[in-house]
Amino acid sequence: METIHRDYSPRDVRFHYIYKALAHPENNGYVTPFTLEERLMHIREAERTLGSAIPWICDTMANDLKHALGDAPNSEFIIDPDGKVVRRRSWSNPVALRRDLEELVGAVEHPTRVEDLDLVGAPPPKVAASGVVPRVRPPDRMSPVTVIPRESSSPFYVKLRAEADENLLRQGKGTLYLGFHLDPLYHVHWNNLAAPLTFSIKTPSGVEATPPRGEGPKVDAPADVDPREFLIEVSGASRDSLTVHVDYFACNDDEGWCRPASQQYTVSLQYDPDGGTVRGRDRGPMDNRARGGPLAQRPGPRPESGPTGRPPETRLDDVERVMGLVVRADAAHRTIQVRGRGGLEREFHLTDDAVLIVDGRRAEPGDLAPGQRVVLGFRRSEDGKALAMRVTARTGGTY
């Protein structure tokens, strides 16, 4: 994208990135912001770490622009001077975009190459150790639910992420995941020399949460940034909300302070279509329930990457995601057979402009081979075929 911007911005083509709801909270240290100012802080952090010159448009906290544009988190649009959308993709494709601009505006005599760019980025800040506290593994098929923080005079150093399993959402009895995540925007870490984090849950009449309160682990390291996670069994749940209160100690070494903090959240046990999915959890072979989509890395530009996905019953041009093992690849017919973790096999047809990445490099259909682990982004055609728009394959290893 940066090379295209370099070539076509002098021709009065204006480029913009759109900050929308995070497709994958936790990736590259980003956690879901609670305020518009925090979204703007995310944009400034992305500009700092990526070194991009492309300006940003920030969506509202209600995600109005995301919904108006079809909810695909890595969509791409070309809009003419009259405001007409002349090209649209549910998955950004720089190769196809350059081809479009060559047709609409004209070809560039000497296209900019990636190695020609002089982007100067910076690494994300690292304030304390991670990987100190083991992560909690929730049950399969968890879905994000709505979390509303109570207004506070102090920053939201800790962000609560809540997820519910299918039984809880459908039947009112099941497992609720509560994850208290430090926000790297504030450069804070846990103070493990003080009392651990504690939380309590207030439930409406007839609803039980077990346990109704808890505390974080005792940690030998004086500081860390790992989330404090808990699994709660809930029964009798209805559309009434839960109230979660948390107390903790946070430290900012740059500013030289450690202080106690308290926050309160309202948790509604209703599916949050903008909640995204957390990568690295085993959610079953072909779970695409989160609208936020699977392959996002962080806000901003990245080579040939893109978050995409759709919940059930969304628009035709929204994109789904599959992870699995290549069983058969037919380069001549541009088809690939993939076996998901549950053993289900499906056939996918590669689109003409499909982006293929094998072992970290751009590839052709002939480079796909049985045994490779693969992530596919695809959409369904009107006749029901699965059209693969992006394929990322790896020889050996795991996703």
Image: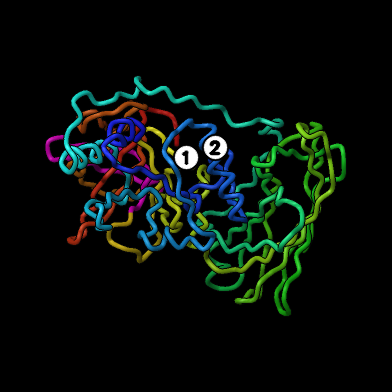
Q: Secondary structure at mark 1?
A: loop
Q: In the drawing, what numbered circle is on residue 200?
A: none
Q: Which image quadrant is residue 130 in?
A: top right
**What residue is rendered at 35% in x and 66% in y?**
313
Most extreme residue toward the right, as rendered? 194
Q: Position of residue 332 (x, y in %)?
A: 12, 36
**Which color scheme did the rendering employ for the protein?**
rainbow
| Mark 2–mark 1 distance (CA, rounded to whole Å) | 7 Å
Q: Quadrant of residue 131?
A: top right
Label number found at residue 28: 2
Say whether marks 2 and 1 touch (CB < 8 Å).
yes
Residue 21: % across, % down: 49, 53
Q: Going from the N terminus, do you reach mark 2 or mark 1 first?
A: 2
Does residue 326 show up magenta in the picture? yes
Left/right of residue 112 with respect to residue 163 in the rendered view: left
Q: Main secondary structure of the magenta part?
A: strand
Q: Secondary structure at mark 2?
A: helix
**Residue 135 picture location, percent across and down:** 65, 42
Depth check, front residue: 58 or 361: 58
Image height of 242 relative to 118, above or below: below
Can you name the residue that lies furthest to the bottom here? 205
Query: What stretch of residues is rendered in magenta?
Result: 319-341
Residue under label 1: 297
Which of the 4 image quadrants contains residue 169?
bottom right
Three-letter amino acid code of the residue under disc 2: Asn
Q: Amino acid at mark 1?
A: Gln
Residue closest to the eye, 108 or 167: 108
At 48% from the left edge and 55% from the top edge, which residue is drawn?
59
Q: Residues within 10 Å of mark 1 (few under 14, many from 20)?
A: many
